[in-house]
Structures are given as C-alpha cells and as structure tokens.
Image: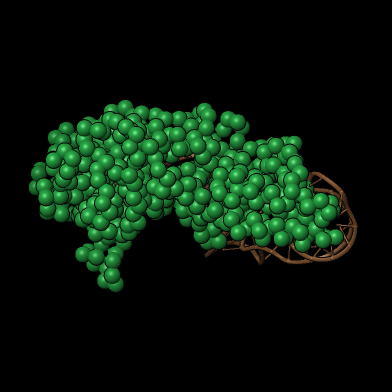
Chain colours: A green, B brown
Amino acid sequence: MSSESKSMDQITALCKRRGFVFQSSQIYGGINGFWDYGPLGTELKRNLKELWWNDMVHRSLAGPADRDVEMVGLDSTIIMNPSVWVASGHVGGFNDPMIDCRESKNRYRADHLGFLGLKGDTTGQIFAYIDGDDDSLAQARKKLSKYVKRELDDDEIDTATIADISTEELGITVGPHAKQAGSLTEPRQFNLMFETFVGAVRDEDARAYLRPETAQGIFANFHNVLDSSRVRVPFGIAQIGKAFRNEVTPRNFTFRSREFEQMEIEFFIHPDEAEQWYAYWRDTRFEWWKSIGLEGDNLQLREHDTSELAHYAKEGAGVCDIEYRFPFTDPGFGELEGVAHRSNYDLKAHADHCGKGEKMRYFDQERNEHYFPHVIEPSAGADRGTLAVLCEAYTPDDSRASKVYMKFDPRLAPIKAAVFPLVAKDGMPEVAEKLYRQLRRHHVCQFDHKQSIGKRYARMDEAGTPYCFTVDGESLSDHCVTVRERDTQAQQRMAIDQVPSFLAEKMGSEP
RNA sequence: GCGGGUGUAGCUCAGUGGUAGAGCGUCACGUUGCCAACGUGAAUGUCGGGCGUUCGAAUCGCCUCACCCGCUCCA
C-alpha cells in the first residue's frame, strides 16, 4: 500500500492508544523533540535493534572475495572527554552565535556585526553594519545621520560590538538590511550539541557534551579494540546507543528527535579497498532494510551529489542514504541510514589532537605498511527504523473489526502469539493457559480469556500479533487448536503439541 | 526562528459566559461456541498551563507550552 492512503494522525493515534509511542513528560504538557516508547513500542524497537545486532555482529556475513566479515561490538559512554568533540570538529566550527533579522530575513554571525550610535544617546536608534564591509558601514552611517538629521563627525559616533550591546539596545537597533528598529533577534547559539557539567562544580573546566553521534566513541577506542581483540583490517566495530542533538526544529513525530538511538558501524579498511567496501556496505544495508519488511517503492537508495557531502567525505568512494517514504515526507523520502566513506578523517584527527600523531597509525602485517585505515560508516537510526516499520505495518482494512492491523514481520512483532479459550468455561481456559505457559518460555505471548473472541482478535490485530491460538470445546477431546493468521484471517486446525514447533518455525528460530 | 492551524475522558469529537457531555474503548458481573455480539453496571477530566476580565470562564484578553502544516535549519 502506498503511504498516501495512510494518515500520520491515525498512526500516531494508534501508537498512543496501543502503547507504542507516547509523548515524553506528557502529564506536564510534553517536551519538544522527545518521545517515549510504551510496552509494545519498546518490544518493537528492541526486536529491531536485536535483529540488527544479530545480523551485523553475531551472524557471519559473507564479505567481498568470500571472506567472512569481521565485526566486534562496543558500548562507549555518552559523555566523553570534551577534547573528542574538538578533534571531531563538532566544537568550534559550529559554535557561532547567529542573529536573525525578522524584517530582511537575513542571518548574521553575531561577532561579524558592528553597531553605530550617537555618543551619549542611550534612547535613540542604533544602526548595525557588517564588520569589514565598507558599503554596509557607510549605509549605517547614512542611516544614523538621517535619523539625527545632521552630518556627524567621527568623534560624535560610538561604535560597539555585540558584546557591548544589551538586550534593550538590540531592541532599538536597525539591522544592516532593515529599515525598522527592533527586527534583530537575540544572538542564538547554533551549536547542536547538548552541554552539561561533570562534577558538582559548575565551572568552565567542567563543561562536557552529550554525544551527537556514537561514532566518535568507536574512533576513540580504535586502538583499545585492536589491542584486545585480535582483529585485523578489514574489520568493523558496531555500536548501538543514544545520541543527542539540539535540533533547530524537531518535527514529524519521532523522526527528528533531540534524543535518539543510533546503530552504527565503523568498518576499517585499507584505502585501496574503499570502493569495494563502500559498495558492499551500501548493498548489504539496503538489503537488510528490505529483509525486515520495508520492501517495495517506499524504500530507496540514493547516492549523494558531491555538493551535499559532509566535510569528512569530500573525496571518498561515496555517500548514500537509505530512505523511506514516510506519510509525512510523501511523495519525498526521509533518511533511515547513511552509508559514508569517511576516509581516515577521524582517526587522523584524534591522532593529531591526542598528541601521538603518526604513532597511532595501524600496522598492516600482510602489506607491511603503516597507515591510518579508512572507514566505511553505515549509520542507521533505530528510532527512524522503528517509525518506518510502524508506518509500513499500518494497514487499514475496513473489512475487519479493528479497521486496521499492524502487519509486522513476525520477528519484529512485539507479541508473537496469543492464546485464547474460545469461551471462558468448560475447561477451555485451563488448556489454553497450559499452552500459553509453554509458548511463553520462548516467545513473547499473551493469554486472554476476557470478552468475546472477536474483540480479542481485533486487539491482537492492532498490536500486530501474527498468530492467535484458540482452544475450543473439542480441544479437550481431539487435542487440537485453531490457529488464526493475522494477515489473511485464515484459520487452520492443528494438534496442540505441534504448536511450539509451528511457532518457532514461523519466527525463524530453533524450537 | 517566521507564518498559519489545533489543543475538552485512553481514542474521535460536541459544547461561544451560567451544573463537564456523546460515541467508541477500558473494567466488573451475567450471557456468549470463531472475528470489536448482547444486557446491566462502573471508573476515568489540571477543558494543555499561568495570569487577567467577570458575580460567574472550556467559552473573552494577554503570556506560555505542546502537536500539525508551510518556510527556514539540519556539520
């Protein structure tokens, strides 16, 4: 089904009603950019992350040239030595306060603005100009002269920088491209990193950051892993963990959240093999998303143009996004995962900043060569993946009681099976509960004997439970139950003792 | 950040200055023999929040928060 016929409002409502996703701190009015997972959503997201971990780290992946892909895991901290973020380029380059002009819609770096005013006058207008731009300065002087209605000598004019300008003064300031006073906003920090302070004393030395990506924890631990795990290039380090970005505009449900979870791999390679491994990971990751049920037109692979490449990937083998057509992006797409050749930018940056330099190079025994390995980075969003799965699974169906069902891949389904007595009497509950207890040892299951059978099926449809087993009056004598399949609503009778192996097979696991 | 819209029960919504409502869902009991059946009953509200106007505010004003849409932004 195309996403046009699915409404995000309806999906959001179901997420709340059935306990997939709640707004964070909802009883206090919520908080912009933060979302919680309820009981079903938690299971769903865990299943997604576990599939990723199993498929990428635990199970053997056949790499290029029929070599098994070597992969190990890592769990690094959210708060790291702030130097990490200096080295990575996250501090510094993106830390400049910006001022917007509401009138002219221009945006200025605050430290690039100069301010002119009549000496001694604290109530008149102030005129801003762009520092170093003579035209802009001349214009500001002209505007000031016009305002005081006479020509001014240099020593009658006060000049100031943003540091000297108070909020009140900004309120009477005319922007460089504006006519009216008061159109400039307060200087705003555009650094997307969350800050915190480590230790009880809140001084500048204690400043630290919540990581904006899990990747740097991997780079910072590259040598630890190398020295402790007998891995050799090419190999990968995988990590799942929270990351934090102070997004300017959180939007679209959980899609752009300020706190989110990443599933990242940094795959370390010799530079000569970059193209081969880039292509490998691009295709492997694309196929993985397909394998969990995002097949069809709603999933696409998009190679980036060179113009949109990040600073660390300008001259690499390539960057691509794996994108999903969400109802709120339709007909466009939203990014689920980026696969990037990050060159050796990060390893080199950390080697430089920690002071060890060339000594941090990797020694390749086979090639008898010292070098900084390049990386291919498949970086996926766990929350975005979960959201895509929710959107894809959402299937309106007027013919059934619930009017909608969640068509999850059985491996992702929060509840794998439900067991019902057809009627809560005549020994049926006892038989059903016994089966339930047996299935529960290996699968997340539910037992429900309340209300009508139709209502119970309907509830399981909305939870996306793929199979329901119903014990009826005959079950006591023929030792069979009816299995009801979520997607087709088809029913089939089978022996009770066949149920565990049936379910195990459907879940793709050993019984 | 800018502009527009919305906010009342778990969900969908009615309620334009005078007692806080409906449908669905939830729960209990009875009934029920395969798809939200039926009957009876029950619980559930900071009317997003604060301040104000008023004898009286879900309703009017101001501020604020959240969500949605369009711009902007997204290393």
Quadrant into which the N terminus of chain A falls? top right
Q: Residue at x 22, y 64 (%)?
A: A204
The image quarter containing residue A286 is top left
**Left or right position of A5 against A77:** right
**Left or right position of A493 against A206:** right
Furthest toward the bottom, the residue is: A200
Give residue A150's position: percent from left, percent from top: 17, 40
Judge by depth and name the residue closer to the eye, A191 or A421.
Answer: A421
Judge by depth and name the residue closer to the eye, A127 or B66.
Answer: B66
The image shows residue A402, relative to residue B18, as above or below, that is above
Give residue A72's position: percent from left, percent from top: 34, 50
Q: Tally the marks.
A: 0
Q: Residue at x 11, y 47 (%)?
A: A358
Inspect this view and state whether residue A194 appears.
no
Give residue A219's position: percent from left, percent from top: 25, 49
Q: Residue at x 18, y 40 (%)?
A: A366
**Left or right position of A109 against A495:** left
Judge by depth and name the residue closer to the eye, A432 or A93.
Answer: A432
Judge by depth and name the residue closer to the eye, A174 or A101.
Answer: A101
Inspect this view and state whether residue A481 appears.
yes
Give residue B11's position: percent from left, percent from top: 65, 49
The image shows residue A496, relative to residue A66, as above or below, that is below
The image shows residue A146, relative to residue A188, as above or below, that is above
Q: Residue at x 13, y 40 (%)?
A: A369
